[in-house]
Image (cartoon, grey):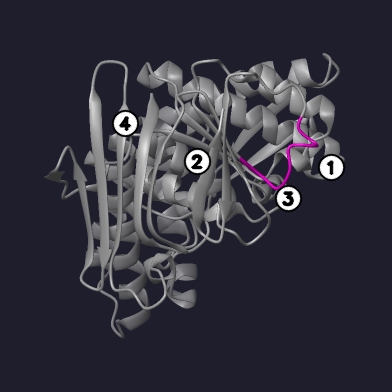
Amino acid sequence: MWLQNLTLKNFRNYQDCQVQFSPHLNIFLGQNAQGKTNFLEAIYFLALTRSHRTRSDKDLICFNCDTVKLTGDLQKLTSSVNLDIQLSSKGRTIKVNHLKQDRLSSYIGTMTIVLFAPEDLQLVKGSPSLRRKFLDIDLGQIKPIYLADLAQYNHVLKQRNSYLKTTKQIDRDFLAVLDDQLVHFGSRVIKQRLDFTKQLEQEANKHHTLISNDLERLTISYQSSFKFDHVNHLEDCFRQELLDSRERDLFKKNTGLGPHRDDLQFFINDMPASFGSQGQHRSLILSLKMAEINLIKKVTGDFPILLLDDVMSELDNYRQTKLLEGIDKDVQTFITTTSLDHLSHLPEDMTIFDIHAGNIQNKRS
């Protein structure tokens, strides 16, 4: 798939902007604080209805404006799709082919993307929430049912935590009902994460082996917050662990285990990757991103769109070369950079956009 065009109205520092894209490589060139990252953020938001930089939609609205509108035309293998998002003080409206979508699971996955940004280097050593977010974004794009299960789980979790915090006299029968719902949806979430992690490990290790010249093996382990000996026993173990930790939950007034507490751990040659060098971390993340592209293609039948937000300067020439060589010619790619000087092995088939103060101009091919 490829994004043919994007129209922005009052998004960040773009008051009124319309751009046509190449189906291949698009480079956005400009100095810092001119709007390069904002533009890639807009593409990300059009795909996922959320920003990778802020949790507040208000941050996306141009100063002294009340509404934001993003519209793009997407060319897929067998059809063309129009995507539309509007934000206002009343909330958001999302549309596919001009039809309003009431559920996120009906929208997300229409346009699939893979983002590689400097903060992704924190995936190895950062907090578990970053790695859970990584799983949720990838799985949400390729399996709409995952988003539905996750939403249901989070809804029950919120109910349970609220009940634990506010109720003076606990009704243990009611708590058992909440536990049953939490186990049902939580087990579905974990099973899908386990399956995805296994596929991700297989695909990422292929790339990591090539990048490391066959010197390193990458493995990925899903770290559950409770023990289970086999996936077939997952629900029973989850239910028993909830029961065993009930006194703890009542005392601390929150739910101490479940997929909202789970994590991923990366290993290089069976050693925790967190102890590795910066170069190893960069190779690991690079392998993950290339694996994401191939997995999305494998599941959906179409390549995702690749966003590279100021990361080429983070990679040495060797890793730059491996990244560009690893991108299939059918993957539409967007790169932001302050200069072309440090970029090597760029293909001839590319389009360059100059960005200055929220204006995109001087297109060069």
Q: Give the SS element for disc 3.
A: loop
Which residue is label 2 attached to? 135
Most foreground residue, 52 or 134:
52
Indicate which disc, 2 or 3, sits on the residue closer to the N terminus.
3
Looking at numbered disc 4 in the image, what kind of residue is underneath it?
A: Leu
Q: Image point 44% across, 33% down: which residue? A: 21
Report if residue 176 lies within the magenta region. Answer: no
Q: Residues within 10 Å of mark 1 (few under 14, many from 20)?
A: few
Examine the image and state in which quarter residue 266 appears.
top right
- Name above or below for residue 102 compared with residue 91: above
Q: Give the SS element for disc 2.
A: helix
CA gap, disc 3 and disc 4:
36 Å
Q: Give the SS element for disc 1.
A: helix
Q: Residues within 10 Å of mark 4 (few under 14, many from 20)?
A: some
Please give the label number shown on residue 278. Answer: 1
Looking at numbered disc 1 in the image, what kind of residue is underneath it?
A: Gln
Q: Image point 29% across, 81% down: which residue? A: 167
- Name above or below for residue 27 compared with residue 183: above
Which portion, as a residue range, is magenta?
A: 336-343
Which residue is label 3 attached to? 125
CA gap, disc 2 and disc 3:
16 Å
- Name above or below for residue 164 compared with residue 355: below
